[in-house]
Amino acid sequence: MPSSKTTNSHFELAGERIAPGERIQFDLPGAQLYTHTPLNTPVEVINGNRPGPVLLICSAIHGDELNGVEIIRRLRTLPALNRLSGTLVLVPVVNLHGFINQSRYLPDRRDLNRCFPGFETGSLGSRIAYGFFNQIVRKCTHVIDLHTAAVNRDNLPQMRADLSTPGVEEMALGFSIPVIINSGLIDKSLRAEAGEIGIPVVTYEAGEALRLSEKAIVTGVRGITNTMRRLGMLPARKTKSAVAKPEIARSSKWLRASTDGMFRPLVELGARVAEGDALGVVSSPFTSLEEIVSSTVEGIVVGMARQPLVNEGEALCHIAVFHDMESVEEKISAHGDVIETDPLFGIEQVKDADIA
Ligand SMILES: [Zn+2]
């Protein structure tokens, strides 16, 4: 029988007890630095007045991926959260060591997103993963994990999701951005391990490591609120302005350098390319030798190298293949225009009161 409950319950997380209608910030005790300086993880919980899902938004599991930190900072100030049903749990920086060191990795070069679900008595990454997974993730019903491309690469804003995991497709479609890549699960990643215990996780990938992109940030904030509407956590939107019907890629392929040298792209993220189209040029720094990098598929450019010095075989352009390429191209362009006119865009010039 569906619940007729209209009042939310207290929410308990990591020893904190949050009443309906209350929001708190606290530090989750974590690892220490070599100096014995405690390194605590800042957590914010917003518990709505009405019952609903418990949604975790986390970012910087890769410590140099910063767009998600700013996405959470903007999301937490939205007046719409006053009408929240359910509970929002925000963890802007999961990998604090990497964040401090401006690095994707932990100090021992381990990738925290390959350490889940972790061990209580394991190495640093394993312990951090264990604490985060057991104290935070397990208390949530849904997760949106925020990422960017790896360092020196750039991603068109996109959803990465394993659509065969129950609950994932609804979240990915609900995010309402043009491109979804149906990507498999990597062992020991947060997405795989949370999915394993029945908690659907989608990953938002947008922009570059160590850079903030206004377009990636605003797209992310709007995508999260769109998913929250889909999950019944926020009231339905009055206008459909920031909503795009997503397209799911059939496949995707990285095009690689055929020689060593300097790469100059000839296409931009979001461009539609045909088989045989020039994606860029790799030139020899000391001769007039140039080699064109041509696409071997028809598709949309969803990822790109931003660092020109490349070796043969290096990944340069990520091309996603869709059933209806023209439609995806149009949606990317239209969605980009909507995001650039969003009141959140360039928020530093806008007073809080002006933001819907
Ligand atoms: Zn990442």
Image (cartoon, rainbow, N blue to C red):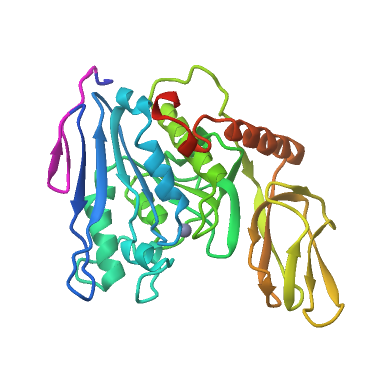
Residue 114 versus residue 277 in the image, above or below: below
* Left or right of 328 on screen, residue 123: left
The residue located at (43%, 67%) in the rendering is 103
Q: Quadrant of residue 128?
A: bottom left
Q: How many marks?
A: 0
Q: Main secondary structure of the magenta part?
A: loop
Q: How far across and down, in percent of the image, does residue 204 sit?
A: 49, 47
Place of residue 61 in the rendered image (x, y in percent of width and height, measured from the top left)? 38, 58
In front of the other: 283 or 312? 283
Q: Nearer the viewer, residue 259 or 325?
A: 259
Q: Is residue 234 above or below residue 191?
A: above
Q: Position of residue 98 (x, y in %)?
A: 37, 66
Residue 325 included in the magenta stretch of the image = no
Residue range (magenta) = 4-19
For residue 338, say whether it is visible. Answer: yes
The residue lying furthest to the right in this view is 288
Q: Is residue 104 left or right of residue 199?
A: right
Residue 245 in view, yes or no: no
Residue with the most extreme bottom position: 286
Q: Residue at x 59, y 30 (%)?
A: 341
Asked which quadrant contains residue 324, the reply is top right
Quarter of the image with the C terminus is top left
Quarter of the figure with residue 180: top right
Name the residue at 49% across, 35% down: 349
Q: What residue lies at 44% left-to-right and 27% top-to-bottom?
A: 355
Q: Position of residue 261 (x, y in %)?
A: 74, 77
Q: Say left or right for 307 vs 47.
A: right
* Above or below for 345 versus 299: above
Q: Quadrant of the N terminus?
A: top left
